[in-house]
Amino acid sequence: MNSSTSTIRSYDAFAGPGDPGYDEAAISFNLAAPLRPLGATTARTVADVQNAVLAADSAGARVVPVSTGHSTGMLGPVADRVHVLRTVLDQPVRVNPDRGIVQIPAGARWDDVVRAAAEHGYAVPHGSSPTVGAIGYLLGGGMSFYGRKVGVAANSVVSITLVQADGGIVTVDETNDPDLFWALRGGGGGFGVVLLVELRMIPMHRVLTGMIAWDATDAAPVARAWATWAATAPRAVTTSLRLLNAPDAPETPEPFRGRQILAIDGSIMLDDDAPENAGDIRRALAEPLSSLVTPLVDTWHVGPVTDAVRTHADPEEPIPYTSDAFALAGIDDDTIDRWYAAAGPGSGSGLIAAELRQLGGAFAETPPGAGAFSGIDAELLAFNVGLAVSLEGTAQARLDLLRIRATLRPYTTNRTAPTFVEEPSTPRRTFADDVEARVDEIRKRVDPDGLFALDVRRSSGM
């Protein structure tokens, strides 16, 4: 890629409501927060991106880049004032096994990246959904099921190529504009349209992954046992404890149908040089828990790294939902008891999921060369989701979200993880005020007229 703008044409690159291509570009994964922007377009080439940026700039418009639509709910009340630029480049994911690097073009989903890396004996610090756009996740920091060993995913980014407000293309890394490279990794957006990310891969062929689940009515002792185990678990282990309300519907697996279940899922990184350790790790995880209450299902297994991207069973098609996320300092019995009382049997919670994601380890560390969001010093991340299919249902889900947050307030920190915050009303402080001030200075330098100003996800108070 080069910085030439000689191929750019001056024309209105955006479709309006009702025009061909508008609906394809104005996508939102959250059906409860549909996008109806002033204009929208899908860019499939680098020149398309440059054309759209310059056209918007000449018209005095504001541009918000999107890919898979997973973060568009954060636009909130400004959604109808922007021009959406959906970037889905007609380029493959490329792996350089000699460098241990994967090149991710705009629009690539984690499933694409995971499979490409696995073909060469590597894993990547992907998210819990195969359909999330890899670049948006990485720019937001990224909390993977390998994170307690490798840290937030943005710290594995090697370089970023983007189109800036003047239509020019730059590639930034530790030596070329290191300040912008720092700000792009978790700084909250508003710097340009990212075309390509180079990501450092993890040499690993296999992973221990899966889910074990119980009827929640009997499983409170299991939740406590998980907390005790998680507090001292090896860094190779990253798991999630979830209360799931499974619908009574034919598409729901029979063991779960119509029940509230308690599930533990995640991944345990395996050393390719010592595969015999897998059995010991597996037994240390499951046997003490299974001895308390017989599980409904146990799918933990050693398999290829491609298995891990679907372990969490996140929805792969758009749904209407509302959510909340916050970090917790405690991982003791009282934390678990409060959580179970607020979201478990007898609580009245109708949420799809109430989750406690295991943190600690490398998640809490800031390695040399880290980005603006370098980690989160907490033991757990709470992430709660409810369906929003009607006004009444949405109101009830939000009451459930507030009740869980209030019940856990004694343990909440003043931080959260950017990629888990999906609504503008959610408190979302991700770094200190001095970090935000530095990010703002860099943003003003690269986008002085605010072409991307409405794409900024600011850190706010808790």
Image (spheres, rainbow, N blue to C red):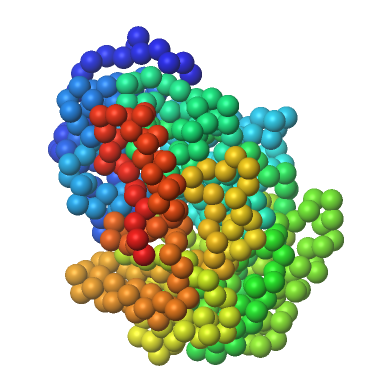
Which residue is at the front of the view, 253 or 195?
195
Q: Position of residue 268 (x, y in %)?
A: 69, 61
Q: Position of residue 412 (x, y in %)?
A: 45, 72
Q: Is residue 374 left or right of residue 150?
A: left
Relative placement, left or right, of 147 versus 50 is right
The residue sitting at 19% across, 31% down in the picture is 61
Front-most of residues 392 and 138:
138
Q: Tell me how many marks there are.
A: 0
The x, y position of residue 419, in whole percent, is 44, 53
Query: 334 and 15: which one is in front?
Result: 334
Residue at 52% x, 31% y is 178
Pick the front one: 94 or 136? 136
Residue at the location (66% across, 30% down)?
A: 96
Locate residue 42 relative to residue 182 in the image: left or right: left
Question: Is residue 86 visible to us here?
Answer: no
Q: Is residue 342 above or below residue 4?
A: below
**Image location of residue 28, percent across then percent down:** 30, 49
459 to 101, vertically: above or below:
below
Q: Residue lying furthest top in this view?
A: 6
Residue at 32% in and 30% down: 447
| 157 relative to 291, above or below | above
